[in-house]
Image (cartoon, rainbow, N blue to C red):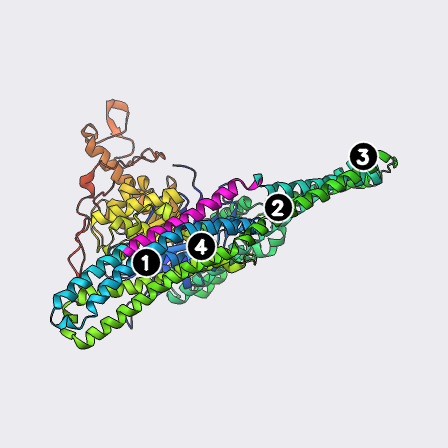
Amino acid sequence: MQNKKNLLTIHNIFAQSNLSENEVDFITLPYVEIFQNEKTAFYINEKNSLLTFDLLWKNIVSNKNVSLAFFDQDSNNKNSEFVTNKKEVLKKMGIFNILEVINEDDENIPLFEIWENILALPTAEKLEKEANQLFKDFDFTLKNVLFNIINKYSKDIIDLNQENIREANLILSKISNNDIGYNPNLFSESIKTLNELSLDYKNDLLDILIELFNAVRENHNKILESYELSNIVRQKRLIENSKKRLFYMNEIKNGSINKLQNSIKIRDFYFEIDFYKKLLRKTKKKSLNLLNYLLKVISRDIKTLKWKLSIVNRESSKFLEIYKDISIKKRVYALLKRNKSKLYYLKAEKIWKLNNYLNTEIKIFINETYRTKKEDTSLNKINKLSKLIYYEFNFNIDKYILESKDFKNKIENEIKEIQSKINKLEKLNFEKILNTQSYWKIDEFERRIKMSEAELQWFKLNEKKLFNSIIKNKEIRIKRLSASFQAVFDELELFKERFTWIKNNYPSIFKENIEMLNNLNHFYDYFYKFKKMISFLSALSDFTTSKAPANKKIIEIYKNILNFSDFVENLSISNANYLIPYCDLKLVDRAKIKLMKFILSKTKLLFVKDSNFITSDIRLEFLRVLFKISEKYNLNFVFVTSHSGLIKANFDRVHFFGNYSLLEGGLVSEVFENPIHPIIYEILVNKKYSLLDVRDTKEYVYDDLFYVDDDNHYVFASLDEFQKWISKRENRNLSNYIAKNPQFNSTMETTVEIEGNEMVNIFYNQEFIITQNNKKSKKVQKNEDLELYNELLSSSEQNAENKKEFTFDENNEQFF
């Protein structure tokens, strides 16, 4: 497993859930981490009555006490930046319900959904820069090239429109005769022919349009490739470089070459100073952002703990445990708040290290047994505890403060040293040397620059003349394209009028053909929606004949066309499938199209909700598509499911949730090999899942993260529970070892020899065995111990809105 890189942390979910009018309960998720480039699963059983993913997500979005931190990769693929603003974090996340790929009622047309998604996309910075650059430097060239592309494919579109209008007119003339009542089969045959014609027309028109958009994209890429070699750009570069040389020639003329060299040294030193100042500002900004986040996390923790404190019995031991937590966290909050300005220049990784140190100290104190007298009242206990914290707990963070100070001083000293060098250079005097030859060279160079500028203007003027010379011809051709589409719209209106007349005069005949007429209605809807895409093409066509430069609207249309072409190329499905309603598409194509919208919107983390209403085959087919898209586009995801066998066979990391809380998680290989929490052990080994509606654990009051063997396996529990469960694990491991090794099945005794050769047990038969703790994780093979994972849950058949929930085996390994 590669080194873990944080992607998202979710902190401090504690939420009330109303079971009924008079009964409430709580869910809790103290902390969970999601890592980059791992196949991650949340196990949340669909039988849960309280903790569901929908409730978790609702709290992630709307619970003000929940803290989110998203780690964004920089260009070097490192965790150099992180986002803590919840609104910004949520923009990077998305949710997809797997039921969408089997929704038989979804009659939306993929083409129009894709187009709307593209229009709503924020423009990528790279594409924005490219488009603006091309329209600025190649205004007339781009107009001519775009016109040639549109003109080429508009001929095909016009021919297609004319041919289909001609065919449609023949059909219209047949059904316009007044003898329909005597020959109803004529109407049925005509409608059937019209349906076939409309289907072919839709597919042919989309093929041409996609080819046109692809040609625009290919031309865009070609212009970019040859950008630096174009006459205009080369001439611009020549002028820019010549002006720089002229500047330095003038500097030498007015002083000397030594003075110029000195000026360049001073300039470079100022660049260095600017670099160091930016480094200080960047370090401070990053550290301040992180420190504010940590303070906010602690503050929200305290709010949640106070809520818990108000719920539990004041005389119970739980009350004191929560009060301990609040008190020590207040102490840490005050410490960070007081020293925040002294930590401004501490690097982010050191701040995380400081945070881990403080959390460790908190954990040690929280889990330490605090003894009180029986006769002490709760108030006396609290007072004693407060004094203990005040006098005994003084966290020492001096080394971190010193490190921050040293870093700042080091940078400031570097700046002072460079500034000292600049001061010395600025005091130097240089003798001006007269050189009549330099005056002549400068004059000659100025003339060359003016000549280059004149050549640039000549290039642009020629392009403009060429554009203006054929503009009239262009306008005529573009008008033909617009007129051709208008003729199609007019033809559709004639058919609608005729169908209305037949419906009113021959209702029985109309009713007999209602299914085919409904198909034609779909075609009308399709074409009027398609009108939006055609309007974009028309606007771009008009721009190619306009003398005005490109405005924001034209550049936006151009970028949308490029995005659409990229989408179609990456999706790799048949063009005809874009026109088929989702409900009639194959599952693979549905999944591809539905998931690709998250790639378009630059989603960084996708939560995918599984459902028991789908079969194992569909689930695996969907996962195959999800994994491929994830790998190709670097899309991180979390799959939320209640199928432990599926998780074991296909995922890298898992987080198990019970009905109330996050329970256990880590690498799949370690958790499945060695479950610690009783509920997880029950799921994975005993092949049962109990909701455990009666709480028998303390996660409601206080829970903490404890690592098992290494940091790739954790359990959420109180300390005493964790110790108890670990002890049970050791006993189980010993029992299993003895069972597999009969030679150790006899009573084992450790003895010493005493007088009379009498052998006795030196531990009086009360010894215990410490087993070896091997920290190396064991990979769980996909094909081993399958019988261990059979028949975990057998869900009953249910009917919900006429949908059947499939019977499934949660623990059966399903992989591909």
- Residue 589 lies, in percent from the top left, at 28, 49
Separation (CA) of disc 4 from disc 1: 28 Å
Q: Which residue is mark 4?
A: 560
Most extreme residue toward the left is 182
Which numbered disc, 2 or 1, marks the residue closer to the eye?
1
Q: Which residue is mark 1?
A: 162
> Taking 156 as reference, is 532 above or below it?
below
What distance separates the C-alpha of mark 2 from that of mark 3?
A: 37 Å
Distance between mark 3 and mark 1 Cα atoms: 74 Å
Separation of residues labelled 4 and 3 (CA atoms): 53 Å
Magenta stretch: includes residue 607? no
Q: Quadrant of the N terminus?
A: top left
Q: Which residues are magenta?
A: 201-228
Amino acid type of the residue that numbered disc 2 sits on in the rendered structure: Phe
Amino acid beneath label 1: Gln
Q: Upstream in the sequence, badge 3 or badge 1?
A: 1
- Which residue is painted at 27% across and 48% down in the image? 588
Whether label 2 touches label 3, CB < 8 Å? no
Q: Relative to the observer, which residue lies in front, 455 or 583? A: 455
Q: In front of the other: label 2 or label 4?
A: 2
Q: Does dot 2 land on a helix, a strand or a loop? A: helix
Extreme residue toward the bottom, this view: 504
Mark 2 near mark 4, Cβ–Cβ under 8 Å? Answer: no
Residue underneath mark 3: 257
Magenta span: chief secondary structure = helix
